[in-house]
Every structure is written in structure tokens, then in C-alpha cells.
Amino acid sequence: MSKVIIFTAGAVPTADEKTFIERVKRQLLGPAGSGPIPSNGHEVVVRSAFGITADSDGNMAYGSGLLETCDYIAEESAGVAPDAASFPYNGKTLYDPAAPPNLNGEATQAVVVDGQVIPTTGAAATVTLTIAGGVITAAVAA
């Protein structure tokens, strides 16, 4: 359904980048994080932004090959992913695991994360969710 490329600053992901990668994988691939392409069709790949270069004509390349196309780009630290104006990343949304987009596009479904505060139209102004093990364990109205 969608492909997310997570960019790391170097050839080997840092501890923070590894945590970020696992968080994105859990959101898109499920609790096991197995894949890269589970039955829901999402694909998560990790690439080093360190190997991205441009030739004399300004054409971007990853290592010795061409850049990959994708639906979303992600980065643990701001400024790591290639410039979103660069082909083929122009117009791509930066995937934020703290506020993940609804990649399935279902109008009656949503992706939620632990600690997310959701505005309501009811008596309570907001509801704060607690999620553990992929299950909503509490919803506190405020």
C-alpha cells in the first residue's frame, strides 16, 4: 500500500535511530515488526543519507545506483533525509510516528499512538489514550 524510507545520518544507525526505526516498523508492520512487506502491504526500508550524492548535472544518486521512489520519507533527526524538493522525494510527506498519517485511507479508521490527545465534540474537550502491546488500555477524558 505504501513505502516509507527511513534515512539514517551514517552507514550504521545510532541507538536513537534504531529506536526510531523500530517505532515506525511497529506502527506499519505490526507488533512483530517482521517484514519488510507484511500482509497489509506496507513496506519499510532503511537507507543511509550519507551515501546520497549528486552528479555534475545535479542528478541525485544513492551510492552507485538510482534513488528509490517511495510514498513517505522519515528521519530520526531533522535534516537527515534528502531535501524534499529533490527528485524523487519532491512532494513526499515526512512520516512522523508521533502523528502518523492514515496510510490505509479508510474514512472510518485512524492510527493512534500512546499518549495521543484527541479533541472531541462531546462533554469532554479531549481524550488521552494509553496504548500498551498494540492495545488501547485506557482512555482518559479531560
Image (cartoon, helix red, strand yellow):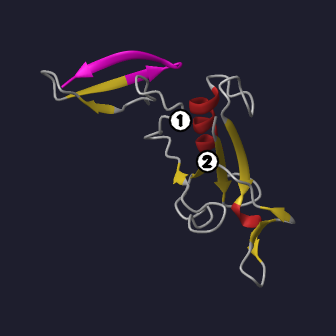
> Residue at the spot x=56%, y=55% of the render?
92
Q: Where is residue 137 in the image (x, y as percent from the top left)?
A: 40, 14
Would you place residue 99 above or below residue 13 in this image?
above
Q: Position of residue 128 (x, y in %)?
A: 30, 27
Asked if residue 132 is among those painted magenta in the image, a careful observer would answer yes
Q: Where is residue 56 in the image (x, y as percent from the top left)?
A: 77, 85
Location of mark 1 (residue)? 103
Dominant SS type (magenta): strand
Q: In the figure, is residue 30 to the left or right of 138?
A: right
The residue under label 1 is which amino acid type? Leu
- Do tag 2 and tag 1 residues touch (Cβ < 8 Å)? yes
Element at label 1: loop
| Residue numbers of the magenta segment | 130-142
The residue under label 2 is which amino acid type? Asp
- Return the mark for residue 71: 2
- Return the mark for residue 20: none
Asked if residue 12 is among those painted magenta in the image, a careful observer would answer no
Would you place residue 63 above or below residue 5 in this image?
below
> Residue at the spot x=30%, y=32% of the render?
117
